[in-house]
Amino acid sequence: MARVILHIDMDAFFAAIEQLRRPELRGKPVVVGGDGNPHKRGVVSTASYEARAYGIHSAMPLRTAYKRCPDAIFLPVDFAAYHEFSGKLRSMLREYSPLVEPMSLDEAYVDISHRGEDPVELARTIKERTKSELGLTASVGVGPNKLLAKIAANLQKPDGLTVIWEQDVEEKLRDLPATVLWGIGPKTAARLHEALGIQTVGDLRRISLERLQEVLGPNHGEWLYHICRGEDDSPVVTEWEPKSMSRETTFQVDVRRRDTLVRVIRRLGEEVCEDARDEGYLVRTVTLKIRYHNFRTHTRAQTLPEPTADHDLLLQTAVGLLDRFTLDRPVRLVGVRFSNLVRSERGAPSSDGGPAEPAAS
Ligand SMILES: [Mg+2]
């Protein structure tokens, strides 16, 4: 069955909520961040579109934002209120599919492959409902996988609805900067530019697999080779997947060092390997989850050619997935999940003879 994925991204979410509940703020530059005092330390969480016109954007120090627009209205972050809106959004999305993967309070993927109706009509309905029921606008991307749905949602904001199907990939991605792709953060982008003169997705597509692997290493190179062609088979991962095993850890102090992350991923991976062995499962899909300091959560998954109990292979896969993240920000949590579990023949309490969850594609 062909996959259809929606990416829902609320527009300037925190600032839009503030403007919704305080009508006098509408049409004005509003900056939400820290405790709302632009003379203290802290960064911008969300800037309203009016504030963005002054060059203010998320993650910018509040002091810089103040310099760019002293007249902006600075407000503290009110997570409780944003959580409430986010909860309403998620319940609405779950009316359309059980497969909803929240990425942050204001963003989620929804797998609607099983539904019969026109996906673009469905996306339009969801947009109308966010307006009428939450009072907020959303930008929605529609595509055959998570990668393309997300790129689509970002192409037109605010209040956009953009579709990228497989046949549109070459034309619609060709002139976009390579950084629209997952796994190309500022460091990788600089590397690709230096070594290969790459700026756009189109440039990237002209580079051979072998050359990309030389520059970025075998895993990352191969992954990018597929990603720049719009190919992505990562599943939409719900938070309560029944047949999966996972371990995660939140750091006491946010971590920036890659070798620390690798060490922790190996330890978590070993623990999940033991769980799988104890319960008699072979594993086919390995997912790595990273939550950054700003609570943005990203997952990357790899499905192996066949279910395995090979600890070395599973750990290597988990660690290899780290290359698909942009590690330019401190990390507060990492998690390793095994799914697509199959009862092993030997010593299994019972055998169901097949994958424990439907395949992702
Ligand atoms: Mg958003």
Image (cartoon, helix red, strand yellow):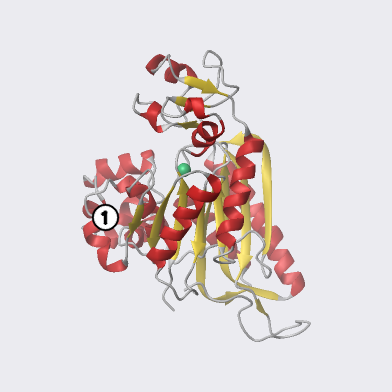
Q: Which residue position is annotated with label 1?
A: 173
Say what amino acid the circle numbered 1 marks.
Leu
Q: Provide residue 75's location: percent of width, then percent of height.
A: 55, 23
Q: Provide residue 134's location: percent of width, then percent of height.
A: 55, 46
Occupied quadrant, residue 225? bottom left
At x 59%, y 46%, the residue is 86
In the image: residue 360, left or right of residue 242: left
Q: Is residue 360 visible?
A: yes
> Is the residue 216 above or below the residue 302 in the image?
above
> Is the residue 314 above or below the residue 53 in the image?
below
Q: Provide residue 92's location: percent of width, then percent of height.
A: 58, 57
Quadrant including the N terminus: bottom left
At x 21%, y 50%, the residue is 175
- Circle 1 SS class: helix
> Is the residue 242 above or below the residue 60 in the image?
below
Occupied quadrant, residue 36? top right
